[in-house]
């Protein structure tokens, strides 16, 4: 089996593999540049950053690669427009956006010549993105980590979305191996997006404790939680999720007002920052459904070598 050619605007990566833009401070310049250098598309998780922090991270990544880099910006972020403007000013290669739907971002993309990719979970939203000018869509299922727009599987939604649009469809959710990539290609996907697999890379800058939590995960440790954003989220069991379930989390004392909509049940950004820094008992650890299948931490180029080998064997 050969890899399909993925074209997003004028961008054609060597391999149709996109590293998911994981917030908060999980997908940073070292990981993003390593994925770009390996022939994929590296994506900075911009949500939780200020516009200036994002500009600095893009510049840092640019010094480390000549490959394709993008940003992922949640529409739910209050500074969404400022982050998009910062990314455009830095001439980012591609913008990924989800967790809500912005029509303005397509105009901004057209004006700047930067392709916009919508993260969707249904054929209806995919059609809307296609009509508004998306260069591609990420079909993200309920098997993904983080915030979820559906409880359906990747295998269910990819064929439906592929039939509904005339732009490339990138499968996302639960993809951790070359065999998984091959299955998505058979279903019609033009490429894949993988987040969880790349957390367990040497270049990912999250804490060792965060990575150990991934490595020690069992299938039954992967659960759904209710996010303050108003969406369900997929995370790993820990002390924080136990307190969340029992109503034992303290309310935020100083709200950052970083989200357009927030229940204020707890500070989501602080919880994600804590886990990335290694304070797992005070943090939320987002992870994809199949995290328990990953048993090693490898350099990104070795992950790519394995994915390519497994894919070709199919």
Image (cartoon, rainbow, N blue to C red):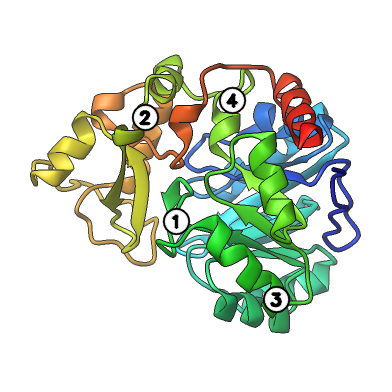
| Quadrant containing the C terminus in the rendered view | top right
* x and y percentages locating residue 289 in the rendered image: 43, 42
Q: Nearer the viewer, mark 4 or mark 3?
A: 3
For the residues labelled 4 and 3, the Cα–Cα distance comes to 35 Å
Residue at image coords 33%, 51%: 256
For the residues labelled 2 and 1, the Cα–Cα distance comes to 22 Å
Left or right relative to 192: residue 296: left
Left or right relative to 246: residue 286: right
Residue nearer the viewer, 122 or 201: 122
Residue nearer the viewer, 273 or 218: 218
Residue at image coords 72%, 65%: 116
Can you identify the residue that label 2 sits on?
Answer: 275
Can you identify the residue that label 1 sits on?
Answer: 142
Compare marks 2 and 4 and give the one earlier in the sequence.
4
Q: Label 4 neighbourhood size at 10 Å, few (<14), some (14-19), many (20+)?
A: many
Question: Mark number for residue 204?
Answer: 4
């Amino acid at each position: 089996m050969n890899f399909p050619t993925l074209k997003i605007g004028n961008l054609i990566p060597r391999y149709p593999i996109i590293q998911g833009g994981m917030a908060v401070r999980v997908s940073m310049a070292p990981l993003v540049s390593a994925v770009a250098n390996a022939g994929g598309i590296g994506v900075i998780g911009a949500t939780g950053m200020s516009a200036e922090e994002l500009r600095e991270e893009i510049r840092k990544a640019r010094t480390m690669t000549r490959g394709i880099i993008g940003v992922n910006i949640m529409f739910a972020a209050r500074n969404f427009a400022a982050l998009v403007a910062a990314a455009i000013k830095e001439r980012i290669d591609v913008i990924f956006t989800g967790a809500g739907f912005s029509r303005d971002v397509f105009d901004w993309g057209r004006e700047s010549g930067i392709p916009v990719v919508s993260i969707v979970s249904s054929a209806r939203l995919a059609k809307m993105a296609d009509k508004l000018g998306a260069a591609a869509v990420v079909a993200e299922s309920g098997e993904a980590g983080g915030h979820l727009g559906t409880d359906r599987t990747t295998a269910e939604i990819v064929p439906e979305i592929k039939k509904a649009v005339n732009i490339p469809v990138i499968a996302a959710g639960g993809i951790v191996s070359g065999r998984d990539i091959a299955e998505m290609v058979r279903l019609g996907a033009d490429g894949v997006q993988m987040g969880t697999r790349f957390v367990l890379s040497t270049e990912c800058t999250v804490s060792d404790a965060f990575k150990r939590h991934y490595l020690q995960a069992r299938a039954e440790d992967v659960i759904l939680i209710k996010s303050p954003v108003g969406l369900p989220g997929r995370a790993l069991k820990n002390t924080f999720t136990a307190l969340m379930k029992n109503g034992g989390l303290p309310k935020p004392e100083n709200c950052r007002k970083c989200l357009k909509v927030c229940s204020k049940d707890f500070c989501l950004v602080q919880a994600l920052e804590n886990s990335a820094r290694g304070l797992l008992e005070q943090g939320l650890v987002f992870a994809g459904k199949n995290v328990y299948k990953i048993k090693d931490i490898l350099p990104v180029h070795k992950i790519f070598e394995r994915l390519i080998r497994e894919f070709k064997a199919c």
